[in-house]
């Protein structure tokens, strides 16, 4: 039942996000970036796991003085690589870095995580592959666990508690309307 509703939620919220105009995505992303820049977790981080936005995901503005690392799918998990001008488009239509140095997850201070939908309990719905959950599940009880910040539009907030036991809870979600912690 939960799985079926998660599939339905993913479809419904993806449609909402897909219907945003380019101008709305740029404006809302700018608001989210401005809020992100005020968060101590972000300002104090040096090495940041990020993503290349697709399908109207929040556009992230990189700032000088920080090192950004981008995911590459490896089996059912994500490996993160230093930002590079060389990349290829994978089977999911996502840019992946090539000819770049791989980082160990514990070397990164913080991860910016895309989402299709989220709830106030700080769980997200992604595309359904479970890549982020599988990647970060070993760190849930670690002392120096990396900070996970979801970025999404407030119109993607769900009132439904859709999470399952394998879902990883984020540390915070930043939207155009504010911060959920």
Image (tube, rainbow, N blue to C red):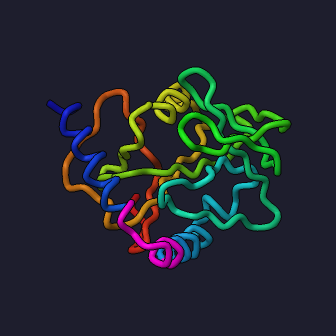
Q: Outermost residue, top direction?
A: 75
Q: Quadrant of residue 162?
A: top left
Tell me if residue 96 is in the magenta stretch. Answer: no
Q: Position of residue 87 (x, y in %)?
A: 75, 43
Q: Position of residue 118 (x, y in %)?
A: 34, 52
Q: Which residues are magenta?
A: 18-27
Our reading of the magenta stretch's main secondary structure is helix
Location of residue 59 with respect to 177 vertically, above or below: above
Residue occupying the point 69% across, 37% down: 80
Q: Outermost residue, left direction?
A: 1
- Quarter that holds the N terminus: top left
Location of residue 42 with respect to 8 vertically, above or below: below
Residue occupying the point 50% across, 32% down: 131
| Total marks placed | 0
Residue occupying the point 31% across, 56% down: 15
- Quarter that holds the C terminus: bottom left
Q: Position of residue 20 (x, y in %)?
A: 39, 69
Query: Is residue 158 rendered to the left or right of residue 47?
Result: left
Tell me if residue 24 is in the magenta stretch. Answer: yes
Query: Is residue 107 rendered to the left or right of residue 127?
Result: right
Residue occupying the point 57% across, 47% down: 147
Q: Quadrant of residue 3?
A: top left
Q: Position of residue 29 (x, y in %)?
A: 52, 71
Observer-nearest of 156 and 143: 156
């Amino acid at each position: 039942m939960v799985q079926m509703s998660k599939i339905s939620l993913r479809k419904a919220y993806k449609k909402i996000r897909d219907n945003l105009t380019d101008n709305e995505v740029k404006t809302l992303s700018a608001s989210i970036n401005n809020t992100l820049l005020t968060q101590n977790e972000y300002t104090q981080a040096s090495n940041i796991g990020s993503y290349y936005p697709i399908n109207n995901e929040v556009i992230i503005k990189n700032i000088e003085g920080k090192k950004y690392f981008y995911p590459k799918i490896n089996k059912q998990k994500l490996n993160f690589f230093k930002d590079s001008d060389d990349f290829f488009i994978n089977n999911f239509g996502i840019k992946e870095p090539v000819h770049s140095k791989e980082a160990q997850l514990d070397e990164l201070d913080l991860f910016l995580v895309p989402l299709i939908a989220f709830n106030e309990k700080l769980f997200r719905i992604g595309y359904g592959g479970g890549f982020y959950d599988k990647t970060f599940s070993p760190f849930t009880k670690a002392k120096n666990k990396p900070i996970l910040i979801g970025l999404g539009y407030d119109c993607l907030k769900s009132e439904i508690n859709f999470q399952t036991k394998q879902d990883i809870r984020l540390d915070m979600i930043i939207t155009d309307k504010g911060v959920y912690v």
